[in-house]
Image (cartoon, rainbow, N blue to C red):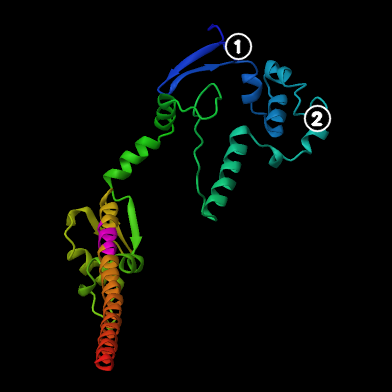
Amino acid sequence: KPKPAKGKAEAHFSLVHYAGTVDYNVLGWLEKNKDPLNDTVVQLYQKSSSKLLAYLYAYHAGDGEGGGKKGGKKKGGSFQTVSALFRENLGKLMTNLRSTHPHFVRCLIPNESKTPGLMENFLVIHQLRCNGVLEGIRICRKGFPSRILYGDFKQRYKVLNASVIPEGQFIDNKKASEKLLGSIDVDHSQYKFGHTKVFFKAGLLGVLEEMRDEKLAELVTMTQAVCRGFLMRREFVKMMERRDAIFTIQYNIRAFMN
């Protein structure tokens, strides 16, 4: 029998799981996990030809008044075992999940001392590993975890090479996405086309985002250069007009003085 740690309940035995050692207390286990017998079964046992079996169930709680006729009037449909109740609750839960769009949030304990602002890296990583988060990420990275609709992809990444998508001409979003990706310098084995979405290997969508940011930076710089050039040309014209005006005034003053 393991000695309980300070602040923890008494345990009768411990099991070493992959996630760690878990202590168990067996008090009340039988009562919690004992399913009640159906009244029909109890009545059948009470009428058994075996005297011992009939004696054992003569005063069973499920039989109203010790095996009388009143107990037989109770319908067996109200009988429900622990496993049946569990299946019913699980079915209701799955029905609710299928009718909604749930977002799951995993809560992690940053430290065992309940100290604010303290993060124990080993404890957090251990929880992520035990919750299956790291394994799920590893599995996702082997597939195509990133996905985006064809219309959204064309709208967002058209800036990378707009010339491949003709203006003023209707083109299917899927065809446009295929042309756009085919014209970009990326590893073409890192993406696949589906019926409504394009799927990417882990990291490729980040590369496309970096390329998009660089392209937008170039376009912004080009736009700024055009705007600055336009403003400077206007300022230069004004400067030339002021210079001509100064020359005219100087010429007239010299002519008047002479």
Q: Which residue is drawn at 40% across and 22% down?
A: 18
Q: Going by the image, does 246 lie left or right of 113?
A: left
The answer to which image quadrant residue 240 occupies is bottom left
Which labelled disc corresponds to residue 98?
none
3D distance between C-alphas at marks 2 and 1: 39 Å
Q: Is mark 2 on a helix, strand or loop?
A: loop
**Residue topped by disc 2:** 64
Q: Position of residue 2 (x, y in %)?
A: 53, 7
- In the rendered structure, which amino acid carries the disc numbered 2? Gly
* Residue 193 seen in this snapshot: no
Secondary structure that dominates the magenta span: helix
Image coordinates of residue 25 in percent, x first then y, are: 59, 15
Q: Indicate whether residue 206 is drawn in magenta.
A: no
Viewer-proximal residue among 81 and 233: 233
Q: In which quarter of the image is residue 100?
A: bottom right
**Where is the N terminus found, in terms of image quarters?**
top right
Nearer-the-camera pick, 32 or 36: 32
Residue 200 percent coordinates (x, y): 28, 54
Q: Are marks 2 and 1 in contact (CB under 8 Å)?
A: no
**Label 2 vs label 1, nearer the camera:** 1
Q: Is residue 12 above or below residue 167?
A: above
Q: Which residue is pictured at 75% across the width and 23% down the height?
A: 60
Q: What residue would you read off at disc 1? A: 10
Magenta-tinted stretch: 211-217
**Which label's residue is closer to the chain start, 2 or 1?**
1
Q: Which amino acid does label 1 sit on?
A: Glu
Query: Seen in the image, is 54 located left or right of residue 169?
Result: right
Is residue 255 shown above or below 83? below
Q: Nearer the viewer, residue 248 or 74?
A: 248
Residue 49 point in image, percent of width and height = 68, 22
Query: Eyeballing the image, is 141 above or below 251?
Result: above
Residue occupying the point 26% across, 79% down: 236
